[in-house]
Amino acid sequence: MKIHNQIYMDVSPVINIGFDLHGVLDNYSEQMVPLLKELCDNGCAVHILSGPSKQKVEQELQALGYIPEVHYHYLFSVVDYLKAEKAEMWKDEKNTWWTQDETWWQSKGNYCRTTHCEYLFDNSIRYKDYMPPMTNFRYICNEQDASLMIELLRDVLYGDKK
């Protein structure tokens, strides 16, 4: 019991922060690559959520300069999740996976609920309606939104110490 209490007392709570790849991390990679490293270095759990398969997303992240365990800890693929959940899915003529709209849009909310993500930064507003109450959804659709995202993340990191 003493060891358990000692461990509990010494470990600060982890902040879980989620980012969409397409439209957020790819559009603002110059600013986000160093910032995600800073978040990881300071004990935040960084989650990347994206539609395509995990394999495809890993390749895209690597090409942008994001390295596992340096810039992020967790990777969530909507397609892989829906396949595992046995959702009805089909491919179009371009080999892109599809499913019912509501099934797709609620997937990131389900992930945030399960992983206790406190923030999700995404460029698709349709995910917002499916977020759990504990997740602060931030819609990123332009440079001004990206600047506010970076400012918020610096506040999460440093608060009054800036």
Image (spheres, rainbow, N blue to C red):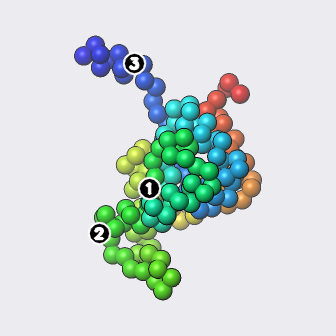
Query: Which tag, 3 or 1, sits closer to the chain's start?
Result: 3
57 on left or right of 111: right
Determine whether the residue tagged by mark 2 lies in a helix, strand or loop: loop
**Is 116 above or below relative to 80?**
above
Which residue bears the numbered disc 3? 9
C-alpha distance separating marks 2 and 3: 41 Å
Q: Three-letter amino acid code at disc 1?
A: Phe
Q: Residues within 10 Å of mark 1 (few under 14, many from 20)?
A: many
- Name the N-terminal-most of marks 2 and 3: 3
Q: Residue furthest top?
A: 2
Residue, x 58% and y 49% (percent of image)?
66
Vertical arrangement, residue 10 with respect to residue 83, above or below: above
Nearest the viewer among 73 and 139 is 73
Q: Residue furthest bottom?
A: 93
Nearest to the observer: residue 61 or residue 7: 61
Q: CA distance from mark 1 to mark 2?
A: 16 Å
Q: Are marks 2 and 3 in contact (CB under 8 Å)?
A: no
Q: Which circle marks residue 86 in the picture?
A: 2
Q: Is residue 23 visible?
A: yes
> How many discs mark residues in the rendered view?
3
**Which residue is label 1 attached to?**
76
Callout 3 amino acid:
Met
The image shows residue 138 at horizontal and vertical percentages of 59, 52
Q: Earlier in the sequence, mark 1 or mark 2?
A: 1
Q: Is residue 97 above or below residue 160?
A: below
Badge number at residue 104 = none
Residue 63 locus on image (x, y percent): 60, 57
- Residue 39: x percent and y percent? 58, 37
- Decide if residue 152 is on the left or right side of residue 6: right
Q: Which mark's residue is nearer the viewer, 3 or 1?
A: 1
Q: Is residue 120 visible?
A: no
Pick the quarter of the image with the N terminus.
Answer: top left
